[in-house]
Image: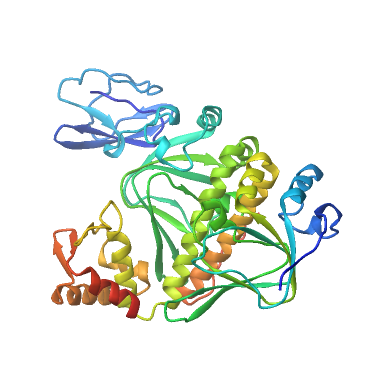
Amino acid sequence: MESAIQQSCLNCTLRPDRLFCDLPSSVLQALDTMKQTLSCPRNTILFREGQAARGVFILCEGRAKLSVCSESGKRLILRIAVPGEVLGLSATLTGTAHEVTAELLDNARVVLVKRKDLLRFLREHREACLHVVTLLSQNLHVAYDRVRSVGLGRARRSRPAHA
Amino acid sequence: MYLCYQSQRSVSVRTDTGIVTSVTRAWPKLQIVAGAPQPESRDLLQIRTGPCPKGGVVLSPYGLDIVESCLTCKMRSERIFCDLPTAALESFEAIKYATAYPKGAVLFVEGQAPRGIFVLCKGRVKLSICATDGKTLILKIAEPGEVLGLSATVSGKPYELTAETIDPCQVNFVKREDFLRFLREHSDACFKVAEQLSEKYNNACHEVRSLGLSHSAGEKLAKLLLEWSSRNGEAAKQEPRLKLALTHEEIAQMIGTSRETVTRLFADLKKRQIIQAKGSTLVVRNKVALKTMATNG
């Protein structure tokens, strides 16, 4: 069962190490007012593929498995998300159904921000929007790597070193 | 009409009967190649229109009508990234380079350090990834309005894909440093970039599912044809039509199989009267059978 717990992002000691969370105090205060902190046991499904996106889940503690599934039930793991990641971001921003299923691998602490609140928050706070753009770019790189390994069955081609 | 463009690397001189010859621009000096008609003026700094000179000459890059300013672009409201407030658009105007490319031009290559973003204004671009043995997988055919090279430009990591034009294209290029500054200064643009990246991520997940979980090449081809036939208002039709803009080789690269398999599958679909080819147009005669094939392989 999910249970709500209170904790302010302003007091989080891990904040500087996490891409999305490393925001100015004023922005974090705004995030604090709209977020909901949940404690979830392992195997909890945060969202399912095909489900309408209701918001994002910021993974504070614990890991989550992101997977896709075929009509016949065959499952393919896309990647393992680690603390600090924001799950369900792309579907929440586009307002479409989730493309993946997110299932917790550990007992975890997650922060839920509802879609409407997130969209307003991003429009009002440019720093947060820039962090989201960077996060999405990183996610996209990982996804393309997965496409490459699944579609071409090989590791990424070697790249020239650059400064 | 007689048009001079300033921002392309090369232009074509065209008459009513077709392209006569090409003109290479080496700014600031214009070099006329192979006896092309002399332009009215050597100063190509402005778009100039007027009565057609004797002989019906039109100067136009690769037959494209270049939209020089985003502020006057009529397509702007229909495109996610471009539909920006006037202030942001004016800033964008100052940092963009409007360029024209012929068919087959490579905008950027997988593994290359990111130089900047390419906003596709006109034409289509093939986005692909490549294995060390040369095997290619086409991820997507980008349509006008898309921003290419976005994730690499934002993250500073090498381009993940290769982008090659499959039509003559107009592309607005923005240097990386300029683009990052633009995003920091304009939150509306930043939000739109987040939306574009989200769409690309959704598309990549869809691709992983299709490649990793489909059982057969037949299933993947059926899914691709159904996806294409659902565009341009054809989805609701009993017998939807689609324009086959890619070769069998390219379709094979989209679904991760060989050209021979694609040709064999098309022959089989035609024989079973599931599809019918009329030139480059394909008519789906039996949508139910195609859907069954997409689900069961």
On the picture, is B105 further left or further right than B264? right
Q: For the N terminus of chain B, which image quadrant?
A: top left
- Residue found 67% across the figure and 41% down from its top: A126
In this picture the colour scheme is rainbow
- Number of numbered callouts drawn: 0
> Picture coordinates of residue A53 (x, y %)?
55, 59
Along the line of sight, the residue nearer the viewer: A63 or A73: A73
- Residue found 37% across the figure and 24% down from its top: B44
On the picture, is B106 further left or further right than A37? left
Where residue B128 sits, quadrant-wise, is bottom left
On the picture, is B283 further left or further right than A73? left
Work out whether residue B292 can be spotted.
Answer: yes
- Residue found 70% across the figure and 68% down from its top: A82
Work out whether residue B178 can be spotted.
Answer: no
On the picture, is B132 further left or further right than B250? right
> Picture coordinates of residue B126 (x, y %)?
38, 56
- Residue found 33% across the figure and 69% down from its top: B223
> Picture coordinates of residue A35 (x, y %)?
72, 54
> Picture coordinates of residue B162 (x, y %)?
45, 58
Along the line of sight, the residue nearer the viewer: A50 or B87: A50
Q: For the C terminus of chain B, which image quadrant?
A: bottom left
Q: Is residue B270 above or below residue B17?
A: below
Where residue B45 sits, quadrant-wise, is top left
